[in-house]
């Protein structure tokens, strides 16, 4: 989350009153409770199955800004500065660089994952709630925040307990993780979700272009279609697993959809209220000071001393004497180990052989079991599956990392793998999130595309006169197990005989790009329909029957006859008998 933002003065008692009523109504409908991560959330928070099975959340369920959008719809007229909060026109202004990053991320996702239908306004809504649009757009010309935006350390004290995963590389904290940057990614999530959005060769969570693109890909995983409300809800809950967070982001999304405009960097409005107000330490921006024109947020008020009750109320309140003698050291509360704390190692849970043809989905999935030192299965442990090495194989949905919680049997089943075009061995590594235990490597194999059957698409005779050109080109169709075999490598050779597959040195031939005679064509591939049409064939002066053999990866073979014969000529007619 962003640093402590000073409260902004608001004009007009009427505006303030309306805003107060809206906040009170929302608060009344969402009384605070405590979720399984220890963070105060709505009592009716309903985590989705997808969110629960994911990597917890993008932010580690860190605090966020709870300001509601104005009741007044955005005005189409531009605003030139932050101004007093509470008007639609002011709140609809998004800093120029931040707005550009959101729109560029939407464009990139439209090409990379068109089925996701990511609107840039969703990134704007999350950016508003997470960091107040990068603290009002305080970024440099490259989009990097001028000061780091850090959430509180996730030490289990009012927040989730996430021990350090990056040795302080992103958050400067080698003990616990903290959410980082304008989109508030925790380091363990950024490690796999991070993207280079500005093309500088780095993945920096403090850069709005990188962070916005990473957020877009994060929201578009699992084949979610964000034009569908159910998938949109799941995606938002996976970012921060709280029903009140979902409701708030949805309100800002609808607000921005009604109209936004660009304001100068650093001139965006700053939020006032946070989900952890009065409950926990405020996140910091190292070296930052309160924005000009704002007043510091007051800390929690000291408790008032006991005062006599009103007459009839039962007298005065008398402090109870201490039950522990002075000087006795207090006993710290016992801590209950989490399931993750009990994991000693990972075991394979019966994963079958993993083999798939290039471009196909693997039919088998990886299964991993988390166990204690005694071999007992551990449920509710997050297992991260990472595809490592130089490969274009991914999980279904295009991601190279997936995190799944173990079930009641201690087993986590990874999403299905989708083979890329690079053939060979692929390694998938399973690790425990939040605990250092040896990883478990799985080997998968991607084989080249193959065909098991080849047939001609036509049955016209292939004939030619010596020194001429065959009228018909050879076209074949390849299939594998009855299905179209596309992208299959093939070779065509004019062979010496049925028993001798070496290239013939006479008879029909192809021509290369320079017009030279060639009798073997390699590097051929079937098209999307499994079709392969060979170039034109020519004949030298040799007559007879010749063979063309086509072979593909996977062993499919087809031999075609070619005939070269001189044209038939009619015999001369007999001389007429002389008349007598």
Image (cartoon, grey):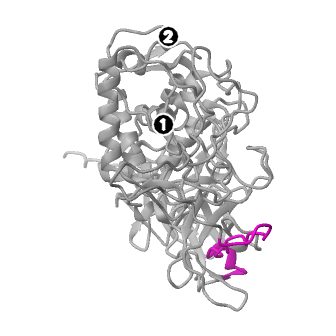
In the rendered view, does 115 fall on the left or right side of 381?
left
**Percent position (x, y) of residue 497?**
61, 70
Judged from the image, the secondary structure of the residue bearing numbered disc 2 is loop
For label 1, the residue is 129
Q: Is 55 above or below relative to 380?
A: above
Q: Is 286 above or below relative to 234?
A: above
**Percent position (x, y) of residue 245?**
42, 46
Residue 212 position by quadrant: top right
In the rendered view, does 574 fall on the left or right side of 244?
left
The answer to whether one can see residue 549 in this image is no
Name the foreground residue: 487 vs 49. 49
Q: Is 87 above or below relative to 474?
A: above
Specify start and end residues of the magenta stretch as a single range. Answer: 323-347
Name the foreground residue: 335 vs 459. 335
Q: Is tag 1's residue or tag 2's residue first in the polypeptide sequence?
A: 2
**Percent position (x, y) of residue 398?**
53, 53
The answer to whether one can see residue 181 in this image is yes
Work out how far the residue at label 1 is from the one at label 2, CA to CA, in angstroms.
20 Å
**Percent position (x, y) of residue 192?**
65, 52
Q: Residues within 10 Å of mark 1 (few under 14, many from 20)?
A: many
Extreme-bottom residue of the structure:
374
In the rendered view, does 297 fall on the left or right side of 503?
left
For label 2, the residue is 81
Identity of the residue drawn at 71% across and 28% down:
147
Identity of the residue drawn at 62% across and 66% down:
321
């Amino acid at each position: 989350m962003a640093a402590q933002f000073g409260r902004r003065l608001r004009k007009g008692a009427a505006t303030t009153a309306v805003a107060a009523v809206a906040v009170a109504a929302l608060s009344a409908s969402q009384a605070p409770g405590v979720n399984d991560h220890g963070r105060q959330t709505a009592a009716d928070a309903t985590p989705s199955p997808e969110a629960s099975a994911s990597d917890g959340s993008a932010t580690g369920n860190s605090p966020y800004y709870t300001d509601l959008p104005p009741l007044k719809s955005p005005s189409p007229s531009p605003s030139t500065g932050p101004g007093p909060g509470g008007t639609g026109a002011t709140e609809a202004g998004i800093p120029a660089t931040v707005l550009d990053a959101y729109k560029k991320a939407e464009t990139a996702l439209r090409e990379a994952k068109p089925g996701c239908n990511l609107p840039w306004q969703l990134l704007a809504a999350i950016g508003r709630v997470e960091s107040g649009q990068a603290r009002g757009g305080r970024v440099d010309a490259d989009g990097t925040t001028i000061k780091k935006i850090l959430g509180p350390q996730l030490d289990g004290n009012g927040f989730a307990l996430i021990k350090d995963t990056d040795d302080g590389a992103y958050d400067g904290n080698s003990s616990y993780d903290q959410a980082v940057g304008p989109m508030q990614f925790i380091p363990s999530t950024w490690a796999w979700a991070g993207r280079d959005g500005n093309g500088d060769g780095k993945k920096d969570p403090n850069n709005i272009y990188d962070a916005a693109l990473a957020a877009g890909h994060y929201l578009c995983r699992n084949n979610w279609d964000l034009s569908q409300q159910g998938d949109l809800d799941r995606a938002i809950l996976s970012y921060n697993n709280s029903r009140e967070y979902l409701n708030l982001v949805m309100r800002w999304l609808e607000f921005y959809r009604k109209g936004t405009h660009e304001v100068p960097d650093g001139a965006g409005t700053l939020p006032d209220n946070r989900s952890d107000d009065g409950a926990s330490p405020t996140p910091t921006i190292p070296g930052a000071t309160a924005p000009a024109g704002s007043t510091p947020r007051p800390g929690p008020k000291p408790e008032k001393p006991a005062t006599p009750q009103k007459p009839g109320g039962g007298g005065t309140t008398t402090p109870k004497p201490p039950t522990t003698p002075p000087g006795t050291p207090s006993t710290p509360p016992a801590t209950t180990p989490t399931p993750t704390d009990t994991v000693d190692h990972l075991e394979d849970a019966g994963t079958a052989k993993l083999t798939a043809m290039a471009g196909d989905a693997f039919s088998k999935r990886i299964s991993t079991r988390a166990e204690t030192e005694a071999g007992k299965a551990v449920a509710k442990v997050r297992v991260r599956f990472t595809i490592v090495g130089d490969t274009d194989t991914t999980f279904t949905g295009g991601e190279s990392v997936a995190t799944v919680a173990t079930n009641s049997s201690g087993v986590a089943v990874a999403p299905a793998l989708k083979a890329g075009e690079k053939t060979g061995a692929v390694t998938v590594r399973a690790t425990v999130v939040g605990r250092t235990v040896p990883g478990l490597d799985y080997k998968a194999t991607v084989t080249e595309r193959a065909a098991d059957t080849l047939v001609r698409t036509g049955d016209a005779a292939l004939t030619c006169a010596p020194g001429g050109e065959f009228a018909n080109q050879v076209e074949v169709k390849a299939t594998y197990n009855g299905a179209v075999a596309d992208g299959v490598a093939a070779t065509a050779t004019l062979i010496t005989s049925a028993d001798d597959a070496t290239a013939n040195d006479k008879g029909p031939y192809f021509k290369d790009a320079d017009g030279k005679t060639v009798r073997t064509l390699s590097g051929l591939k079937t098209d999307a329909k499994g079709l392969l049409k060979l170039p034109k064939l020519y004949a030298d002066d040799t007559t007879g029957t010749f063979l063309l053999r086509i072979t593909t990866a996977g062993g499919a073979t087809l031999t075609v006859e070619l005939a070269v014969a001189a044209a038939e000529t009619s015999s001369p007619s007999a001389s007429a008998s002389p008349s007598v």
